[in-house]
Image: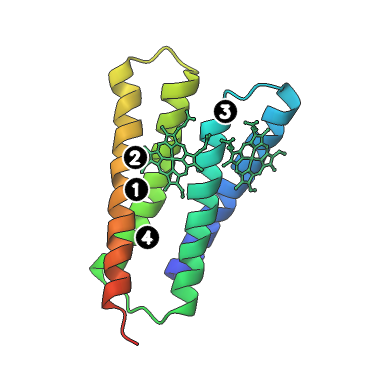
Amino acid sequence: MNNSLVLVRFASIFGLIGAVLGAHMAGAGSYAFRPVHAHILVVGWLSLFAWAVFYKVFKIEQSVLTQIHVWTAIIGSTGLTIGMWLNMVKPFPLPEGVTLLFYIGGGVTLLISFITFFLITLFTKK
Ligand code: HEM
Ligand code: HEM
C-alpha cells in the first residue's frame, strides 16, 4: 500500500475520534480532554493528512527513510495521544511509570518522525 493511502486512512481515524471528543467536551462542558483532543487533531489528523498529501504531490522514492517516517508518524501520534490520555485524564489507576512510558515513548517516536521528514525534504531533488 502506498504511503499516502496509509497516512490518509490513519488521519481519517484520528479526525473522527478527535471530532467526537470535541463534541463530547462541548456537550459535557468538561475540558478534561482538551490536550488529548488538540493533539489527536493537530498531530493525528492535520499532520498525517499533510504528509499524505506530501507523498502525493512530490515524487518521493520509497526508501528506509520514508518507511521510518510513515510508521513513526503513525505509532508516535498514537502513542503520544494514548499516553496523554492515560497520564492527564487518568482513566485507569495505572502507575505513573506506565503512563509515562506511552507518553514519552510516543512523543520521542513522533520527534523521530519529524526529523526523518526534515531529512526527506533535504534529499528531495528538484
Ligand atoms: C477538526 C478540527 C479541529 C481541530 C484541529 C481542533 C483543535 C483544537 C485545539 C488546538 C484546541 C485547544 C485550544 C486551546 O488550547 O485553547 C481545541 C479545543 C476545543 N475543541 Fe477543537 N478542534 C477541532 C474540532 C472540534 C470539534 C468538531 C469540536 C466540537 C464539536 C471541538 C470542540 C472543542 C472544545 C469544546 C474545545 C475546548 C475549548 C476551550 O478550551 O475553551 N473541536 N480544539
Ligand atoms: C512531540 C511530542 C509532543 C509533546 C510531548 C507535546 C506536549 C504538549 C503539552 C504538554 C501541551 C500542554 C497541554 C496542556 O494544556 O495541558 C501541549 C500543547 C499543545 N501542543 Fe503539543 N506536544 C507534542 C507535539 C505537538 C505537535 C507535533 C503539535 C502540532 C502539530 C502540537 C500542538 C499543540 C497545541 C496546538 C497545543 C495547545 C493545545 C491545548 O492547549 O490544549 N504538539 N503539547
Picture residue at 69% right of the left edge, 30% below the top: 24
Pick the residue in front: 106 or 35.
35
Counting residues from the start of the chain, the first of labels 2 and 4 encountered is 4
Q: Could you tell me if the residues under marks 1 and 4 are in contact, i.e. CB atoms within 8 Å?
A: no
Q: Position of residue 86 (x, y in %)?
A: 44, 24
Q: Residue furthest top?
A: 93
Counting residues from the start of the chain, the first of labels 1 and 3 encountered is 3
Side (left or right) of 117 relative to 23:
left
- Ligand 2 within 8 Å of the CB at mark 1: yes
Pick the residue in front: 38 or 82.
38
| Mark 3, secondary structure of its residue | loop
Q: CA distance from mark 1 to mark 4?
A: 10 Å
Q: Could you tell me if the residues under marks 2 and 1 are in contact, i.e. CB atoms within 8 Å?
A: yes
Per the image, the residue denoted by label 4 is 70
| Mark 1, secondary structure of its residue | helix
Per the image, the residue denoted by label 1 is 110
Per the image, the residue denoted by label 2 is 106
Q: Amino acid at mark 1?
A: Leu
Pick the residue in front: 106 or 31.
31
Picture residue at 51% right of the left edge, 70% below the top: 53
Picture residue at 31% right of the left edge, 22% below the top: 98
Q: Amino acid at mark 3?
A: Phe
- For marks 2 and 3, give the one nearer the viewer: 3
| Mark 4, secondary structure of its residue | helix
Q: CA distance from mark 2 to mark 1?
A: 6 Å
What is the crowding at mark 2: few (fewer than 14 residues within 10 Å), some, or many (at least 20)?
many
Query: Which of the image's four quarters has the N terminus?
Result: bottom left
The image quadrant of residue 58 is bottom left
49 in relation to 59, above or below = above
Counting residues from the start of the chain, the first of labels 4 and 3 encountered is 3
